[in-house]
Image: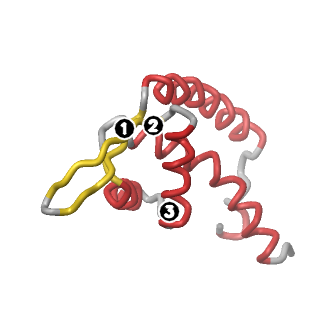
């Protein structure tokens, strides 16, 4: 039986790339940090603030997101949107993602269905 630490580390590695795809996809429509957290959570993907905000800054510094400060409800918020370069990356990674899922599905038939999982 694999120990929980090994599992947690493997899961974190697996989620890292998926979170990138999810954020680029979600920000095709403009949003601010908390709205992204809430929208992804409603879709079944919970992300910690400590993961999202550094990712937003990194993606912006790489030219994959654009941002602007706006004041709404008397609060300044930084709104993000996927840039044209980010859309290009999202489209290319989505094609690769679908290929990988198809391949993995072929490699792992029935796994998880054993032992009532």
Mark 2 and mark 3 in contact? Answer it, CB < 8 Å: no
User: Which of these two is toward me, 96 or 110?
Assistant: 96
What's the image's color scheme?
A: secondary structure
Of all residues, the one furthest to the right in this rendering is 1
Q: Which residue is mark 3?
A: 47
Q: Residue 105's spot in the image, x, y percent?
A: 68, 40
Is 95 above or below relative to 20?
above
Q: CA distance from mark 2 to mark 3?
A: 18 Å
Which circle's residue, 1 or 3, is located before the other in the chain? 3
Q: Is residue 104 left or right of residue 36?
A: right
Residue under the point 23% across and 49% down: 70
Q: Secondary structure at mark 2?
A: strand
Q: Which residue is mark 2?
A: 65
Determine crowd level at label 1: few under 14, some 14-19, many 20+ residues with C-alpha closer than 10 A.
many
Is 28 above or below relative to 11?
above
Q: Is residue 32 left or right of residue 82?
A: left
Q: CA distance from mark 1 to mark 3?
A: 18 Å
Q: Residue 68's spot in the image, x, y percent?
A: 32, 42
Q: Residue 52's spot in the image, x, y percent?
A: 50, 57
Is 26 above or below relative to 94?
below
The nearer-to-camera label among 1 and 3 is 1
Mark 1 and mark 2 in contact? Answer it, CB < 8 Å: yes
Which circle's residue, 2 or 3, is located before the other in the chain? 3
What number is the disc on residue 81? 1
User: Which of these two is toward me, 65 or 111?
Assistant: 65
Q: Quadrant of the C terminus?
A: bottom right
Q: Quadrant of the N terminus?
A: bottom right
Q: How many marks?
A: 3
Rendering quarter of residue 12? bottom right
The nearer-to-camera label among 2 and 3 is 2
Residue under the point 33% across and 51% down: 78
């Amino acid at each position: 039986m694999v120990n929980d630490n090994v599992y947690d580390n493997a899961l974190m590695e697996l989620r890292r790339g998926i979170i990138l795809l999810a954020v680029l996809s979600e920000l095709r429509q403009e949003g601010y940090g908390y709205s992204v957290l809430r929208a992804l959570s409603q879709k079944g993907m919970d992300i910690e603030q400590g993961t999202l905000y550094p990712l937003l800054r990194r993606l912006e510094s790489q030219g994959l997101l654009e941002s602007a400060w706006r004041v709404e409800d008397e609060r300044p918020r930084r709104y993000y949107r996927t840039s044209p370069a980010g859309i290009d990356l999202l489209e290319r990674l989505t094609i690769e993602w679908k290929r990988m899922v198809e391949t993995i599905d072929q490699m792992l038939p029935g796994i998880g269905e054993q032992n009532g999982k």
